[in-house]
Image: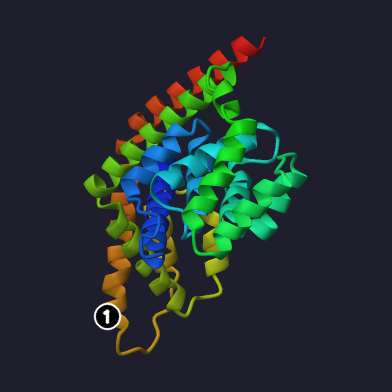
Amino acid sequence: MGAAIDAHRKFEAHQLSTQAMLRATGNAAGQTEASLERLARSLGDELSTSRAAVTEMLRVRSVSGATFDAAMQAAKDLAATGFGDLSSAARAVGRALTNPAQGLAALEAAGIRFSHQQKTVIQNLHETGRAAESQQVTLGVLTDQIGGLGAMRDGSLNSAYTALGNALQRSGEQFGGAIVPTTRLVSVVQALATALDTINDFRLSPEVDLFLKMIVGVPLAGSVAMVARAIIPVEDPKARMRERQMRQAVDIAASFEGMRRQHEGYEAVIAGIEKEHRALKQTNLE
C-alpha cells in the first residue's frame, strides 16, 4: 500500500504542477493535461523522465499545437544521440525554437549542422515575426539529420523493460488513487498532523525523553497515548479542549494503524509483481 500511495502522491503533485503551468502560460501550447500525459507516455522513456521533459517544453510559450509534438519528437531523437537526458534535450530544442541566435549554437556544439543559409533564413523569419515558419525550418533540419534515432530504441530489450516499469508505475498511481479517497487518507493524515502539533504545544515533563525511548517499536496509537500520559497538566483555559484533541489523536492513530494492516495484502501483491520483474530482468541479463 505504501508504494502505491507514494506513487499516487507524486503523480498528484505532477498533475497540480501541470495545471498550474497551463494556467500560468495561458495555455499557449494549445495542450490539455490529458494530451500532455498521452504525449509523455508515447515518448518511450521512463514515465517520470518523459513527464519532466514535457513540462520543460511547456515552459516554451511560443511552441504550440502540432509543433509542440514535433519538438518533443526532436528532443527524443536528440537524446538518442547521447546529448543528454530527455529533459535536457527538450530544453535545448525549445531554446533553439525560441532563441535561434543562442539555441542553434548549442545544437551545433552537440553535433547538429546548420548551413550559413539555413541559419540566416531561421534568424530572419524569427526577427520578422514569422516564428512558426522559423520553427518549422529548424525542426526540418533536425529531422533530416537525426530523425528516427529515438524510434530505433523502441524495439530494444531495455525499451521493453522501460515499458514494463512504466506500466507498474501507472498501476501504482491508479491503485494509490483508489486507496486515498476510500480510506479518507488526506483527512486522516491532516488530522493526525494537527493532533501531533497539539502534543508539541504542550509543556512536557522531564520523563518524556524516557517515554520516547521506551516507545521504539510500539504501534503508532500506543506511542501517541504514552506521550499523552507523559504531559504535565498546566494551567490553561483550553486544557480540556486539548485533552479532547489528545484523545482524538489516539483514536486517529489507531484508525490509521487499522487501515495500514487492512491494505498490507495489496502492498504485498505489488511487491510480488516488482520482485518478479526484477528476477526476470536479472535472468535476461545473465
Residue 11 as seen in the image, left or right of residue 149: left
Q: Residues within 10 Å of mark 1 (few under 14, many from 20)?
A: few
Among the 4 quarters of the image, the one containing residue 251? bottom left
Q: In the image, is residue 204 above or below residue 190? A: below
Q: In the image, is residue 237 above or below residue 83? A: below
Q: Amino acid at mark 1?
A: Arg
Q: Residue at x 59, y 48 (%)?
A: 93
Q: Do we see residue 112 in this rendering?
A: yes
- Give whichever of 266, 159 is nearer the camera: 159
- Give whichever of 62, 36 is nearer the camera: 62
**Snapshot colouring:** rainbow
On the rendered image, what quadrant is the N terminus found in? Answer: top left
- Give whichever of 240, 118 is nearer the camera: 118
Residue 35 as seen in the image, left or right of residue 120: left
Q: In the image as oriented, which residue stretches furthest toward the left?
A: 182
Q: Residue at x 34, y 41 (%)?
A: 176
| Secondary element type, mark 1 | helix
The spot of residue 264 in percent (x, y) is 36, 34
- Give whichever of 207, 216 is nearer the camera: 216
Q: Do we see residue 225 in this rendering?
A: no
Q: Residue at x 48, y 47 (%)?
A: 54
The spot of residue 144 in percent (x, y) is 60, 32
The spot of residue 6 in percent (x, y) is 43, 45
Q: In the image, is residue 178 above or below residue 231? A: above
- Residue at which label 1 appears: 240
User: How many numbered marks does the figure carry?
Assistant: 1
Q: In the image, is residue 229 above or below residue 50? A: below
The spot of residue 96 in percent (x, y) is 61, 53
On the rendered image, what quadrant is the C terminus found in? Answer: top right
